[in-house]
């Protein structure tokens, strides 16, 4: 009988120990771990520049805003309006942008269209007293016929190395080329209202 009582006591003690052990067990972190792993597995991707222009149409001869800041003599003597487009096509290709020259000065209905306009052409000085040249361009970017962004570009030049041996058109061409380089930079990230170059 004594042995039987000891057996009952032993069984009860074991059961109580098992119940007591559960009261000291920490809550399972499985649910928290699952939530955490779910969150980290869906990381937010960094924003992509969807506005980066890879293909764009440009007028074969860019526009000129007729005003008192445009040197008519420079327009007559130099090929600035077509030089800009030709340089843009050539130099943009090297930077991964495909430029298609079109005859229409108006935006295309499909795709990107870049419309640069000369708003200032200054041709001061000459090879004897030193060149003082400056061109300024206002560029507007259209997408599917709608304006999406615009920027201003301006570059000046004194002719650079051996500038005194260069003609006016050559020095003006240097300013056009610099403006083209800035335009290509802008087309990679066409922020609205951006200003490039020597514009104060």
Image (tube, rainbow, N blue to C red):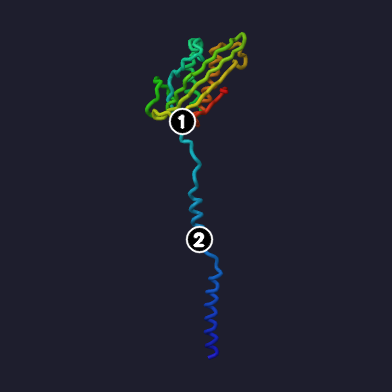
**Which element type, helix, strand or loop, lies under badge 1?**
loop
Can you say whether 16 is above or below 85 in the image?
below
Residue name at image x 59 percent, y 14 percent: 132
Callout 2 environment at 10 Å: few (<14), some (14 to 19), or many (20+)?
Answer: few
Residue name at image x 44 percent, y 18 percent: 61
Residue 55: image x %, image y %?
A: 44, 29
Q: Which mark is residue 6?
A: none
Residue 58: image x %, image y %?
A: 44, 23
Q: Which mark is residue 30?
A: 2
**Which element type, helix, strand or loop, lies under badge 2?**
helix
Q: Residue furthest bottom?
A: 1
Quickly name the residue at label 1. 53
The quadrant of the image that shows the C terminus is top right
Residue 199: image x %, image y %?
A: 56, 23
Closer to the chain start, of discs 2 and 1, is: 2
Left or right: where does residue 80 sit relative to residue 111? Answer: right
Can you say whether 74 is above or below 193 in the image?
above
Count the numbered circles shown: 2
Left or right: where does residue 97 sit relative to residue 164? Answer: left
Q: Residue furthest left?
A: 109
């Amino acid at each position: 009988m004594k042995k039987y009582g000891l057996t009952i006591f032993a069984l009860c003690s074991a059961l109580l120990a098992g119940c007591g052990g559960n009261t000291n067990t920490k809550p399972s972190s499985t649910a928290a771990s699952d939530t955490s792993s779910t969150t980290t597995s869906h990381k937010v991707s960094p924003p992509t520049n969807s506005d980066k222009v890879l293909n764009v149409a440009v007028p074969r001869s860019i526009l000129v805003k007729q005003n008192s800041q445009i040197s008519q003599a420079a327009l007559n003597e130099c090929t600035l309006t077509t030089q800009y487009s030709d340089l843009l096509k050539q130099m943009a290709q090297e930077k991964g942008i495909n430029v298609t020259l079109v005859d229409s000065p108006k935006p295309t209905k499909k795709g990107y269209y870049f419309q640069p306009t000369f708003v200032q052409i200054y041709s001061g000085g000459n090879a004897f007293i030193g060149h003082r040249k400056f061109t300024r361009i206002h560029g507007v970017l259209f997408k599917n016929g709608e304006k999406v962004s615009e920027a201003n570009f301006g570059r000046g030049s004194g002719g650079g190395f051996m500038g005194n041996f260069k003609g006016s058109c050559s020095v003006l061409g240097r300013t056009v080329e610099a403006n083209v380089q800035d335009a290509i930079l802008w087309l990679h990230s066409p922020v609205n209202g951006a200003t490039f170059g020597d514009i104060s």
